[in-house]
Image: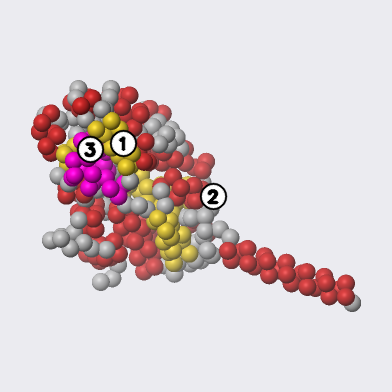
Amino acid sequence: MKRNMKKWLAGMLAGALALTLTACGGGTQGEDTIVIYDGQFAEMQIIHRMVKLLVEEHTDAKVNIKDEMAPPASYSEIVRGNADLMNSYDGTLLTTFLHLDPSDVPDDMTLYDYANQEAAAEGVRLLGKLGLNNTYQVAVPQAIADEYNLKTISDLAAVSDQLVFAAEHDFFTEEGSAKYIPLTEFYGLQFKEAKQIDINLKYSAVQNGNMDVTVVYATDGLNKEAQLVLLEDDRNFFPEYNGALLVRTDLFDRMQDAAPNLEEVLEMLTGRLTTDVMIDLSYQVDVGVDGVKKSVDEVAKTFLQENGLIAS
């Protein structure tokens, strides 16, 4: 009798443990919840809120936006199955996540199509292009552009030894071919000094004169606020960074009950977010209109309502 009781208790404990692991394991949190790790920039945060608003209005699924995470880490969580979706770019997928180079793209394929083809082995894919190209751009303050008559990155190469370059830590990593060392080697840049700074301090450092050259994202509203001159990439070093939602390939099958129309809902953003539109949206968050900043939630909701994608 005691032995049977022990077996019964052991079975109950094992069952309870299994239920606990099922409840806690994996980032998907059930068959009706989409998990997203938030981005570190206004653009990613706005798009993630748009996803949440669209999904929760047009399906029975829920969206859980977790804490901010650097893109490579967020991508790793998606590949591991601990997250489902993130805002990304075809250039980032190719160079940073897959460690390939634009020169690897076959002549008969676009960068977008090739990145998607290669990503299949990782269990992820890009949805339709959102409409923006958020590529890197080398930027200088207006005063530096005027002093050295800078219009292109090739112009910069001739005077780089007189200037200080600074950018966020991520731009100095070896994850991806479109980063600091490949850039300097490609254009023959030899800066007087190169400094890594916190991304949140980059624009204040520019405005305070603590650096002469940096890299920015083309759609960042702070470029306008800091009055930066974006130098032409005249030798086409940087690849395209077409914005697109990156999803696990098994997401739509998993969400069949709660959101059988999920892919259609997510594709509602395709072609809607041009570069100029995103500059304006991120400007509202980072700088504000008449000095009043808006929250990412407010900006995302207003855009969707004005475009008839969710109810007013």
Q: Position of residue 283 (x, y in %)?
A: 21, 54
Q: Residues within 10 Å of mark 3 (few under 14, many from 20)?
A: many
Labels 3 & 1 near each other (Cβ < 8 A): yes
Q: Is residue 304 left or right of residue 85?
A: left
Residue extent of the magenta highlight: 199-218
Q: What amino acid type should be assigned to the residue bearing mark 1?
A: Lys
Q: Position of residue 146 (x, y in %)?
A: 10, 33
Q: Position of residue 285 (x, y in %)?
A: 24, 58
- The answer to which quarter of the image holds residue 188 is top left
Q: Position of residue 32 (x, y in %)?
A: 49, 66
Q: CA distance from mark 1 to mark 2?
A: 33 Å
Q: What amino acid type should be assigned to the residue bearing mark 2?
A: Arg
At 14% from the left edge and 34% from the top edge, which residue is drawn? 144
Foreground: 207 or 32? Answer: 207
Q: Which residue is mark 3?
A: 211
Foreground: 3 or 300? Answer: 3
At 61% from the left edge and 64% from the top edge, which residue is drawn? 22
Foreground: 32 or 22? Answer: 22
- The answer to which quarter of the image holds residue 66 is bottom left
Q: What amino acid type should be assigned to the residue bearing mark 3?
A: Met
Which image quarter is the N terminus in?
Answer: bottom right
Of labels 3 and 2, earlier in sequence is 2
Name the mark on residue 80: 2
Which element is circle 3 on?
loop
| Depicted 158 relative to depicted 304: above or below | above
